[in-house]
């Protein structure tokens, strides 16, 4: 990596989560160059945050132009979701331009694409570090922590409870993509199709009430590389009434999988949604949970209340950027816990529950 290169370029900088990340970067005296497709929105951000007047406006249809726009930078942070439409193009451009790549995805297919580039990343002497936001960071670090306590674990179950949490436009668009696709679990080390809600888990005691259904969260992919545990599933906590009504999920999937209906839904979301207010975020209660089981049936589990998702993403992404900009990570493709260590999650913990 050329140490003489400029610092950080953020693509998709006008998004809700990107704004929160910019705030955190400025606290760390990092002034990123902003980029995206919407010039007027980028200019407003530059004025709002008093950022460098230079900016980059480009789409990702022409790889040569993308390379030309990013090649002067040390590191690129991709905040333009759904990432299935942006990540691979930017990763390929970063490989050609010798630019480090980070993003905040939680999409399994994007993670799979990234991890297939490990050899190329090492040859290009760059770091590829996807999923440095809430969608993976705390649960990936938790999975690593649990695996170190139970190194012979055969099964890993992870879960998320996000009470009163609201989501941004980008997250909602990504959710539509996930719900219209296939569910996934990890079985005997192999990524395997599993309908959303095929598996359920109930954890109810004096410390926690968790009614979860299986979903294709990013950890189904990343935790295998972080822990080498062969069987992994991820669960989203639902209100009890929905937990007992999962029969409705196939009907919802069928509706939103229709390309015309999906197009209308996406159009409405893009026009009417931005993201939750700070007041709304303060009301959110977020809990991550993990359980490992070894061959003998022995169980070990931990659960924590952590920072609200968007606040966590902003801090996590900013800290990861600092690490990469300082060239503290060797070239290659990483999960968050493999790049940053499982103790990276400690800064986000508000309370240990189990």
Image (cartoon, helix red, strand yellow):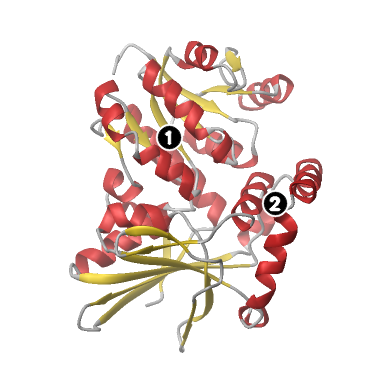
Q: Is residue 5 above or below residue 181?
A: above
Percent coordinates x, y for residue 273 in the rendering:
76, 47
Residue occupying the point 29% across, 52% down: 225
Mark identifier at residue 102: 1
Q: Is mark 2 on a helix, strand or loop?
A: loop
Tag 2 residue: 277
Q: Is mark 1 on a helix, strand or loop?
A: strand
Percent coordinates x, y for residue 231 in the rendering:
33, 67
- Any part of residue 334 in sight: yes
- Any part of residue 346 in sight: no
Q: In the figure, residue 72 lies in which quadrant?
A: top left
Measured in 3D between alpha carbons, the distance from the residue under mark 1 to the one under mark 2, in whole angstroms, is 26 Å
Mark identifier at residue 51: none
Percent coordinates x, y for residue 348 in the rendering:
42, 56
Give 308 or 81, whichever is nearer the viewer. Answer: 81
Percent coordinates x, y for residue 176 in the rendering:
66, 53
Residue occupying the point 56% across, 50% down: 310
Report crowding for label 1: few under 14, some 14 to 19, many 20 or more residues within 10 A (C-alpha).
many
Q: For this view, does 137 lie left or right of residue 56?
A: left
**First of labels 1, 2 by sequence position:** 1
Give 270 or 199, whichever is nearer the viewer. Answer: 199
The image quadrant where one finds the N terminus is: top left
Q: In this view, does 147 lie above or below 329?
A: below
The image quadrant where one finds the C terminus is: bottom left
């Amino acid at each position: 990596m050329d140490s003489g290169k400029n610092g950080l370029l953020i693509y998709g900088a006008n998004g809700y989560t990107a704004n929160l990340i910019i705030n955190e970067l400025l606290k760390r005296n990092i002034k990123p160059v902003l980029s995206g497709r919407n010039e007027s929105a980028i200019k407003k951000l530059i004025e709002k945050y008093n950022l460098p007047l230079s900016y980059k406006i480009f789409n990702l249809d022409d790889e040569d132009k993308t390379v030309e726009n990013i090649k002067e930078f040390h590191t690129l942070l991709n905040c333009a979701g759904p990432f299935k439409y942006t990540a691979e193009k930017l990763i390929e451009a970063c490989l050609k331009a010798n630019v480090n790549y980070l993003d905040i995805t939680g999409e399994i297919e994007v993670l799979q694409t990234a991890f297939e580039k490990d050899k190329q990343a090492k040859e290009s002497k760059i770091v590829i570090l996807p999923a440095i936001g809430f969608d993976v960071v705390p649960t990936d670090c938790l999975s690593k922590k649990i695996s170190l306590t139970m190194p012979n674990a055969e099964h890993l179950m992870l879960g998320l409870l996000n009470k009163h949490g609201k989501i941004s436009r980008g997250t909602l668009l990504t959710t539509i993509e996930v719900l219209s696709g296939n569910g996934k679990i990890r079985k005997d080390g192999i990524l395997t199709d599993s309908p959303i809600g095929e598996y359920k888990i109930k954890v109810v005691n004096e410390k926690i009430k968790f009614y979860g259904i299986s979903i294709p969260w990013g950890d189904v992919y990343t935790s295998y590389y972080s822990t080498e545990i062969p069987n992994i599933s991820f669960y989203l906590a639902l209100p009890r009434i929905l937990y007992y009504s999962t029969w409705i999920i196939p009907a919802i999937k069928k509706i939103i999988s229709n390309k015309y209906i999906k197009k209308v839904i996406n159009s409405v979301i893009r026009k009417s949604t931005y993201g939750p207010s700070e007041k709304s975020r303060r009301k959110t209660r977020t809990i991550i949970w993990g359980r490992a089981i070894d061959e003998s049936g022995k169980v070990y589990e931990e659960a924590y209340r952590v920072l609200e998702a968007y606040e966590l993403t902003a801090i996590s992404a900013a800290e990861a950027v600092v690490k990469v900009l300082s060239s503290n990570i060797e070239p290659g493709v990483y999960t968050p816990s493999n790049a940053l260590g499982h103790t990276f999650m400690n800064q986000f913990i508000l309370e240990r529950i189990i």
